[in-house]
Image (spheres, rainbow, N blue to C red):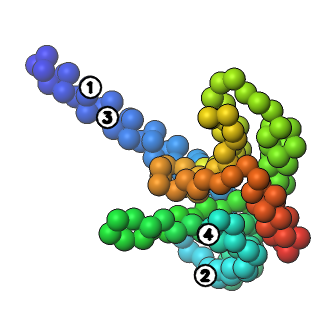
Amino acid sequence: MKYLFVFSMVVLLSFCNTFSQDLNKKQSQSEIEGFTSQDGILLQKEFIDVGEFKKCKINIAIFTDLLANISKKGIRFEYEVKGKYSNDTKIAFLDVDEIDALIKSITIIKENVLPQIKNNYTEIQYTSRGGFIAGCYWSDKSWTGFMKIEKYDKDSYMWFKSTEFDQLLTVLNNAKLKL
């Protein structure tokens, strides 16, 4: 009887942990991802090419429910990771209201963070609702930029030189102008 109780508790705790992980994944969606994952909509997807940064394609994404005539816009990042046996495409979306925050974050990094010299390993990062991350880190006496396209995927990191933040800002500003 005692073992049955312990077994039941272990199963219950495992279920609760799995449920909370699924809930966290659902909560960490952009509005665009939530909109496109709805059932019962006739969805039109339009992608407008804006440019490319370090082999990451950046598009304006416009999703329209043709039944309700409701649209959501944002930016789509698409990055192809070459694996040993196959390629995998990593995709992230930023909602319209997150674009300004990302641009402001990158501008602060470029103007205020990159001129600093640190004594310790240091990371600076912006994280979107959907889990897209952009930032930089200090290591080996220099700053290195990075983007992580998918939150739960260690293979979706892109690395770039600190001098390349200007190129990223240019593409993001062009996307903002076209929205």
C-alpha span from label 3 to label 2: 37 Å
Amino acid type, label 1: Met
Please give the residue where the numbered disc 2 appears in the rendered image: 42
In screen coordinates, is 21 left or right of 38? left
Residue occupying the point 69% across, 66% down: 53
Q: Position of residue 10 (x, y in %)?
A: 25, 28
Residue for point 73% across, 74% down: 51
Which residue does the numbered mark 1 point to in the structure image?
9
Q: Viewer-proximal residue, 114 or 172?
A: 114
Residue occupied by mark 3: 14
Classify mark 4: residues with Cα within 10 Å, few (<14), some (14-19) or many (20+).
few
Query: What's under tag 2, amino acid-wise?
Result: Leu
* Element type where label 1 sits in the image: helix
Q: Secondary structure at mark 2?
A: loop
Q: Is residue 115 above or below residue 34?
A: above
Q: Of the residues tagged 2 and 4, which is closer to the observer?
A: 4
Q: Quadrant of the N terminus?
A: top left
Task: Say which amino acid is labelled 3.
Answer: Ser
Residue at image mark 4: 55
How many residues crowd around disc 2 within 10 Å: few (fewer than 14), some, or many (20 or more)? few
